[in-house]
Amino acid sequence: MSKSQRDKGLRGEREVAKAFELAGFPVRGLEGSGDHLVVCSADLTLHVESKRHEALRMGDWSKQAEAEAPQGTVPVVAYRRSREPWRVSLLLDDFVALLPHER
């Protein structure tokens, strides 16, 4: 990986962390990786894997996020291509569990 690619990835990680921080969520970087933990509530912490690539490799990235997510966190992949908005991907079961519902 070239220096410019690494720099692009680091900028992407900072952009994602800043988006969560601006929304009022505490963000903690994980040592030795570009991943972040985003504390959304007492019951919900996201493990966010950030990717800035032109070629999307969602299967690989999703497996990476799921494998690296600490116990009790929801693995999320935040990704974008150049000149496109940030998007997120997560397991359907995790997404459904996050939706408000009556009991």
Image (cartoon, rainbow, N blue to C red):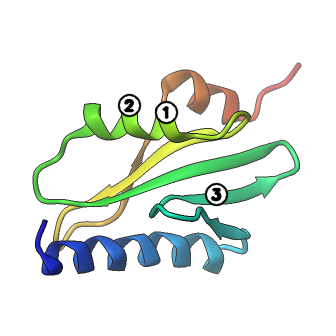
Q: Within the image, what quadrant is residue 99 found in?
A: top right
For residue 63, the mark is 2
Q: Can residue 18 be seen in this view?
A: yes
For the point 64% across and 57% down, the residue is 37
- Answer whether labels 1 and 3 touch (C-beta < 8 Å): no
- Dot 2: few (<14), some (14–19), or many (≥20) neighbours within 10 Å? few
Q: Distance between the residues labelled 1 and 3?
A: 13 Å
Name above or below for residue 18 compared with residue 50: below
For the point 72% across and 48% down, the residue is 45
* In the foreground, 18 or 99: 18
- Answer whether labels 3 and 2 touch (C-beta < 8 Å): no
x%, y% of residue 88?
Answer: 42, 49
Q: Distance between the residues labelled 3 and 2?
A: 17 Å
x%, y% of residue 60?
Answer: 27, 35
Q: Name the residue under label 3.
A: 37
Q: Distance between the residues labelled 1 and 2?
A: 5 Å
Q: Within the image, what quadrant is residue 21 found in?
A: bottom right
